[in-house]
Amino acid sequence: MSSYRAAVCTELTGPDSIQIQTREARPLASGEVRIAVKAAGLNFPDLLMTQGKYQFRPDPPFIPGLEAAGEVLEVASDVQSVKPGDRVMAGGKGGALAEQWIVGDSAVSPLPAALSFAEGACWQTAASTAWHALVERGHLQPGETILILGASGGVGMAAVKMAKHIGATVIGTGSNEEKLEAIHHAGADHLIDSADQNLATKVKALTDGKGVNVVYDPVGGDLALTATRAIAWNGRYLIVGFASGTIPAFPANHIMIKTYSVIGVRAGEGPRRDPELAIRQRAALRDLADKGIMRPHISHRFSLTDAAQSLGVLERREAIGRVVVEMTTSS
């Protein structure tokens, strides 16, 4: 078996704990696929895992990375879905920040011709979150209006593109001019600074006083409570994550008075618990990927040796769209 390099989290102290180590490849078990990783896409949970703050809390040492794209090196004897040489995307609970990654065959899908390795490496997690939130949980309809918090982040920008694909009017928030410009380029109809004290009032003005039908919130914190004041009667509030680091407490009396629904979104766990949903979601995502919908905006590219710095970009909130770690200079 060959050896390979990997970015290893050695302590739960954040990006500074990342070390590049050489590991020995292990034999494949039944149903497994070995991938030569070409690019790995970073997600906010990767940062949180290095800090011990994510709901899935692996003990060090572990290799972060939830998704990657590359070429199949080897498959177990019982795997029929892919073969060596296939260009693929893959997802899992960790391990992507390495030159090789072993995943189950069900976690592997063909890399669409519409996407490069770098794009494919950061497509699945954000796209599945946006689809699951807006279609399966939020039931966003053409002609409705949606407020997307943290719209310059990976899952936020995917939601902007998915909402426009559905036919909704999109209001996106961002924290500076560069991020707002990227949100506009992604397709948002209206832009609001997330720090604007009059955010709720401005949203009401953009919706003829009605408020938005749906709020998509991967941020949490104080901004979440501000957004509830901008929601319409019978609206839907989608809880996607807590990138702010603060979990908000929603006032039950306000939810009752405005009769809006607060809906949790877990794009990975939902399909794991519901096989029919898994089939439906996989088919929908395959179609969207083939069409190049939700093509990611990549603001930062790093080599594997600079994996700690790449996570630091997430920690400092500098990313616009996605951060990618490439094993080679080509994508």
Image (tube, rainbow, N blue to C red):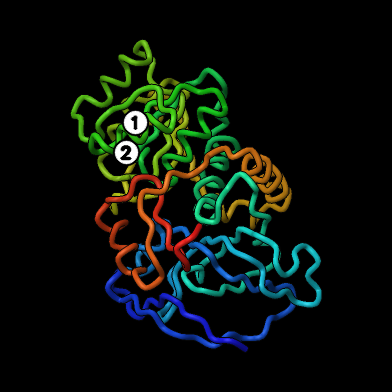
Residue at x 64% of width, y 47% of height: 113
Q: Is residue 121 left or right of residue 84?
A: left
- Hey, what amino acid is under mark 1? Thr
* Cα separation between marks 1 and 2: 7 Å
Task: Specify the label residue 228 is tagged with.
Answer: 1
The residue at 27%/51% (across/down) is 317
* Front residue of 95 and 145: 95
Q: Secondary structure at mark 1?
A: helix
Q: Position of residue 2 (x, y in %)?
A: 59, 87
Q: Secondary structure beneath disc 2?
A: helix
Q: Neighbour class for label 1 at 10 Å: few (<14), some, many (≥20)?
A: many
Q: Quadrant of the N terminus?
A: bottom right
Residue 32 in view: yes
Q: Amino acid at mark 2?
A: Ala
Farthest residue, direction front: 330
> Is 48 located above or below residue 274 in the figure?
below
User: What x and y, as percent, mark residue 117?
Assistant: 55, 56
Counting every numbered tag in the picture gives 2
Q: Quadrant of residue 269?
A: bottom right
Which residue is farthest left?
A: 197
Which residue does the numbered mark 2 point to in the structure image?
224
Describe residue 329's horizontal placement relative to residue 272 as left or right: left
Quadrant of the rendered image containing residue 73 = bottom right
Instruction: State whether residue 259 appears in this view.
Output: no
> Residue 171 location, x and y as percent?
38, 26
Q: Cβ–Cβ below 8 Å for labels 1 and 2? A: yes
Q: How many residues crowd mark 2 within 10 Å: few (<14), some (14–19), many (20+)?
A: many
Q: Point out residue 276 in the picture as x, y percentages from the top left corner.
A: 73, 48
Q: Is residue 316 above or below residue 207?
A: below
Viewer-proximal residue, 19 or 37?
A: 37
